[in-house]
Amino acid sequence: MRDALRINGQRLVARLAALGEIGALEGGGVCRLALSDEDRQGRERVIDWMRELGLSVSVDAMGNLFGLRPGREEGPPVMTGSHIDTVRTGGLYDGNLGVLAGLEVIETLNDAGITTRRPLCVAAFTNEEGARFAPDMMGSLVYVGGMPLEEALETRGIDGARVGDCLDAIGARGEAPVGAPDVHAFVELHIEQGPVLEESGVTIGAVEKVQGISWTEFTFTGTSNHAGTTPMRLRHDAGYAAMATATFVRELATRLGGDQVGTVGALTLSPNLVNVVANQARFTVDLRNTDNELLKQAERSLADFVTQLAEEEGIEVERRTLARFDPVPFDPAMVDRVEASARALGHSVMRMPSGAGHDAQMLARVCPTSMIFVPSVGGISHNIKEYTAPDDLEAGANVLLQVLLGLSE
């Protein structure tokens, strides 16, 4: 009977659409930045759904949200989930799928009258995206003891707001303790956010590892001057230095090849006028690689380039690390379980790495962990055009259901 159990795909899609109404953008996207009022509304809707499903709801001091379904026996739960915060121009599926598919699994078990041996828990972690507060995966990092709670609460966002103040402002600071949790296993369903599954014609990705991430903020300070009267040889142009670094990051990633990627995603010039040489440029560099030694090599190359450039241009440079996570391998037996469940359901499946960071990489510090990917149409994510077909959403949720059933028994 349990092998034949299936989730309700229409119900899952309806919940995704309903959550997507909160912070909705024109064109179909969502803006629900961490600890914003939209995030508050999203949390309240998820809590309502959890309570409707009979889950025991708790929130920790970091704002991480948990819905617990008791098992026939007490003990560490089998956990699933993800996040509901988005980037400023997000879609309906990134993070949201993992949380709402978890709720759909719970409702499916409720409908079938099944009580698992181990408890089940659905989690929604705070500030996974890092779009407002760095680092990303902050809530799950604090949850597993990888970042002190007080340090996280004192973190200030791109708007100057403090995490602790924002938690209080939206009523999201709970009373449950944080720290290294006792979890039997963790499984996260997520859209791929890349083109590999779609290009390969494969329905399910069994994720073997998450690549390492290095985020650095650079600030170049030069001299503001007239764009028409200042000879090129006498300029101390912070804007030029920032753009030269952006070009170098692209060339570096191409030269290293393989899984190396590099991005300059945020750039602010001052005074930001058409006819004035910029005296300050603040920008971010995002480097990622599945090989930690190659990632370190990329970091060294970037640091050397920036130091030499600043000297040549006669400008000052400041560096600030926003996030640094080593590559994370997932438990081989858990990856095997995902692959076997997908095949048993008749789905095509491939093993693959994740190019994006996820809460699962933090949970891997404290329990056996794996991830399930479903295709992203056109490989598009962090974009209002983000889309995964309903059949693929249903396929992924059914794999999640069977994996959770196996782990909980």
Image: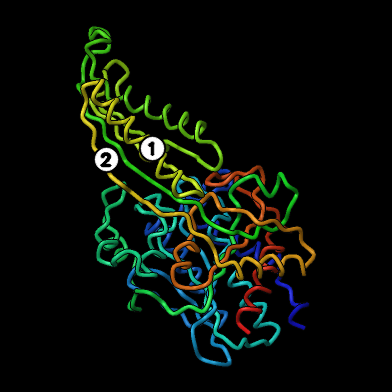
Q: Earlier in the sequence, mark 2 or mark 1?
A: 1
CA neighbours of label 2 inside 10 A, class few (<14), some (14 to 19), many (20+): some
Q: Nearer the viewer, residue 236 or 92?
A: 236
Point out residue 277 in the picture as x, y percentages from the top left corner: 26, 18
Which labelled disc corresponds to residue 319? 2
Name above or below for residue 341 compared with residue 206. below
The residue under label 2 is which amino acid type?
Answer: Arg
Q: Which mark is residue 354?
A: none
Q: Give the vertical position of 331 relative to 69 (above or below).
A: above
Which of these two is toward me, 306 or 155?
Answer: 306
Q: Is residue 86 above or below residue 335?
A: above
Q: Do tag 2 and tag 1 residues touch (Cβ < 8 Å)?
A: no
Three-letter amino acid code of the residue under disc 1: Ala
* Badge 1 element: loop
Residue 356 in the image: above or below residue 139:
above
Rendering quarter of residue 248: top left
C-alpha span from label 2 to label 1: 15 Å
Q: Position of residue 354 (x, y in %)?
A: 56, 53
Which residue is the extreme one toward the bottom? 73
- Residue depicted at x 69% and y 65%: 339
Q: Nearer the viewer, mark 2 or mark 1?
A: 2
Looking at this rendering, what residue extends furthest in the front direction? Answer: 293
For disc 1, the marked residue is: 266
From the viewer's perspective, is 86 left or right of 338? left
If the image is split into quadrants, where does the C terminus sit?
Answer: bottom right
What residue is rendered at 48% in x and 61% in y?
A: 361
Q: Is residue 48 left or right of residue 408?
A: left
Image x and y of residue 276, in percent: 26, 18
- Is any atom of residue 49 visible in this view? yes
Q: Secondary structure at mark 2?
A: strand
Q: In the rendered view, does 140 fall on the left or right side of 282? A: right
**Residue 26 horizontal/vertical position (percent):** 54, 44
